[in-house]
Image (cartoon, rainbow, N blue to C red):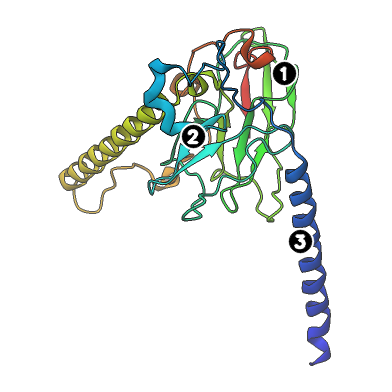
Amino acid sequence: MPSIFRPVTAFARKALKINKNAEKSLARKLDAADRAHPPPRFSIEGDYEYIDYTETSRDYLHHLLDKIDGDGLWKCCRGHEQELIHWKGEHPFKRLRCNTCEHILCHRCESTTVLTRMEGDTVLPYEYHEVSGPISYGQICSNCGLTHRARGVQITVDTAANERVSNMTFANVVCVCGHRADNTWLHFWIGPIYEYRRNPHDAFASLSRQRAESSVRRQQERLEHGTRRESLPCGSSSRGDSSSNLSGPHAQWSISTSNVSSPPMSRPPSSQLGQPPTPWMTGSFSS
């Protein structure tokens, strides 16, 4: 081998070794993670969070008993189902990669409320609230599917409104795979699990209905977009100036609070799973 290539080869070997060590360290960390919520119990008594699925009146749910071990469900956009389990630590859902086709969860996939995607960019017009305990926000690496919990909360003051706001810190996150956080990473809010635990049959049905409605809506948007393009003069664009011609779920990297898609306002009970209720959406994300 020519001597000129030896430093490059040595650097590549060193980088590969570092990457393998990082993957091994991550694997140990994921294996050691504890569940954020205990697995469901199927007792004769049952309670609000853990409804009894063995009652005679719930015979129609018996075929689901073997499936229910998680905190929610997600369906990839190719139609495959897998459970969601919320874990403690830096990686709240570990890797969100389809077990069947290895597709990484994207903006076309559907999920129950435990993983509520934040559509568009994420400026949230909520009042200041002291955040205690694990942060209930995260993002998904678009390269490998590893989930990352927001790292911290930065308190700032909105001088115009004379209010304090909380900004979730997402910036400068580099995944183990080497991919740096950007506008292709999906942001999410970790929501309640009691609806899925209370009636998984309805959660499955609701998710299927939601996916069908989303498919119809996307088809209508494609048809409307095609109609608009046909009505435009030759050479013009329906998207306006080319400087804003971005694509993907986070096309608008800056968004006004009036256009924000907020988390579902279904406040969980204060006794939910033995934990305090999720802090009510405090402030804004900082990307």
Please state which amino acid type lies under the numbered disc 3: Asn
Q: On the picture, is 47 further left or further right than 87?
A: left
Quote the CA–CA distance across marks 1 and 2.
Answer: 35 Å
Write down the quadrant of residue 171 in the picture: top right
**Residue 168 versus residue 45: which sits nearer the camera?**
45
Of marks 1 and 2, the one in the foreground:
2
Of marks 1 and 3, the one in the foreground:
3
Q: Residues within 10 Å of mark 3 (few under 14, many from 20)?
A: some
What residue lies at 43% left-to-right and 29% top-to-bottom? 62
Q: Can you see residue 257?
A: yes
Quote the CA–CA distance across marks 1 and 3.
Answer: 36 Å
The residue that label 1 is drawn on is 156
The residue that label 2 is drawn on is 73
Residue 261 image label:
none
Q: Can you see residue 121?
A: no
Dots 1, 2 in contact, CB < 8 A: no
Task: Give percent across and percent down for residue 106.
Answer: 48, 44
Circle nearer the N terminus (1, 2): 2
The residue that label 3 is drawn on is 19
**Residue 58 versus residue 95: which sits nearer the camera?**
58
Task: Give percent across and percent down for residue 19.
Answer: 76, 61
**Residue 163 versus residue 69: which sits nearer the camera?**
69
* Position of 162 relative to 229 (above/below): above
Residue lying furthest bottom in this view? Answer: 1
* Position of 222 relative to 282 (above/below): below
Quote the CA–CA distance across marks 2 and 3.
Answer: 31 Å
Q: On the picture, is 282 further left or further right than 219?
A: right
Write down the quadrant of residue 71 in the picture: top right
Circle nearer the N terminus (2, 3): 3
* Position of 205 relative to 127 (above/below): below
Please state which amino acid type lies under the numbered disc 1: Thr
